[in-house]
């Protein structure tokens, strides 16, 4: 499977009996978080746009339309990232369980039936914090790039590539963590499969922008990320 196939396979998996129960809670969480984040982001659009324009010298006022367009992209991207971060932190224990059950179904290898929810919760939230420390410095770098005249023409492409990469980092990590693979090792394996990693992540990045569909995206992406792990990243475990 290529990266896109893995995503659609995840969509099929979450509809199977025995897995649906791990999808319901994340969908409810996503509905609440997305409503709050998007409402706040776009309610602040005019104020943020004005603040950016005030930073520009007078002789650059003619590019205000371009600035407005770029600001809309940045605000939209930030809203998506904030939604993804908050929703994934809250629903991380459920996502970890979903990933584990999908891997068991696909590989036929069952984990222990004694599931300690406290351990899963602690480990999942700790992993989300690790991803945040990786994500935030790069996010701020992109924001700065978006504000530099001339270079900001590259910003939309940089946001798309970065978004695709981070989507794969986010959703392949649940299976990696379940297999006790460190976050740094996951990124090394993704670098070795960079094209497929971007291919998987880019479809999530764009689908997450579709209203209503994005409410069920996180469980689908977790399922697809688990498939992607098995197809493209897990093999290194067996390599001496």
Image (cartoon, rainbow, N blue to C red):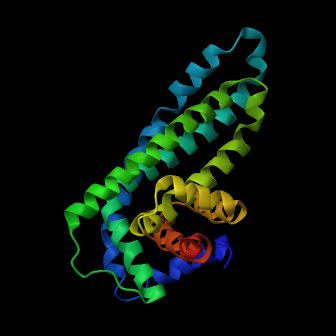
Foreground of the two, 229 or 51: 229
Q: What residue is drawn where x is 33% and y is 72%? A: 97
Residue sitting farthest toward the front = 240
Q: Is residue 8 left or right of residue 121?
A: right
Q: Is residue 23 visible?
A: no
Q: Identify the residue at horizontal 58%, vertical 38% (top origin).
A: 138
Compared to 120, does 230 lie above or below? below
- x, y percentage for residue 74? 60, 38
Residue 200 in the image: state x and y as whole percent: 63, 66
Q: Is residue 174 rendered to the left or right of residue 49?
A: left
- Quadrant, the N terminus: bottom right
Q: Is residue 205 visible?
A: yes
Left or right, residue 156 beside residue 209: right
Which residue: 43% across, 87% down?
A: 105
Q: Nearer the viewer, residue 33 or 141?
A: 141
The quadrant of the picture occupied by the C terminus is bottom right
Q: Is residue 163 rendered to the left or right of residue 226?
A: right
- Residue in the image at 63% along x and 15% along y: 55
Residue lying farthest to the top in this orientation: 58
Is residue 41 placed above or below 103 in the rendered structure?
Answer: above
Q: Position of residue 197 (x, y in %)?
A: 65, 62
Q: Give coordinates of residue 162: x percent, y percent.
A: 63, 47
Q: Choose between 78 and 61: the one closer to the eye.
A: 78
Foreground of the two, 2 or 239 = 239
Q: Is residue 128 above or below residue 97?
A: above
């Amino acid at each position: 499977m290529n990266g896109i196939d893995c995503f659609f396979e995840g969509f099929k998996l979450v509809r199977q009996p025995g897995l649906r129960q791990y999808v319901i809670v994340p969908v409810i969480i996503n509905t609440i978080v997305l409503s709050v984040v998007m409402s706040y982001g776009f309610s602040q659009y005019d104020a943020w746009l004005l603040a950016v324009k005030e930073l520009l010298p007078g002789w650059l006022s003619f590019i205000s339309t371009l600035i407005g367009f770029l600001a809309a992209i940045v605000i939209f991207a930030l809203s998506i990232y904030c939604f993804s971060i908050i929703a994934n932190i809250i629903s991380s224990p459920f996502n970890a369980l979903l990933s584990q059950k999908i891997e068991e179904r696909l590989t036929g290898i069952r984990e222990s039936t004694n599931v300690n929810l406290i351990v899963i919760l602690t480990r999942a939230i700790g992993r989300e914090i690790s991803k945040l420390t990786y994500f935030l410095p790069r996010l701020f770098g992109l924001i700065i790039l978006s504000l530099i005249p001339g270079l900001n023409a590259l910003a939309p492409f940089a946001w798309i590539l970065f978004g695709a990469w981070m989507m794969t980092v986010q959703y392949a990590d649940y299976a990696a963590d379940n297999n006790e693979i460190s976050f740094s090792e996951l990124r090394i394996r993704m670098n070795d499969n960079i094209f497929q990693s971007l291919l998987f992540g880019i479809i999530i990045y764009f689908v997450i922008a579709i209203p209503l569909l994005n409410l069920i995206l996180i469980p689908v992406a977790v399922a697809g990320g688990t498939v992607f792990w098995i197809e493209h990243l897990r093999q290194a475990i067996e390599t001496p």
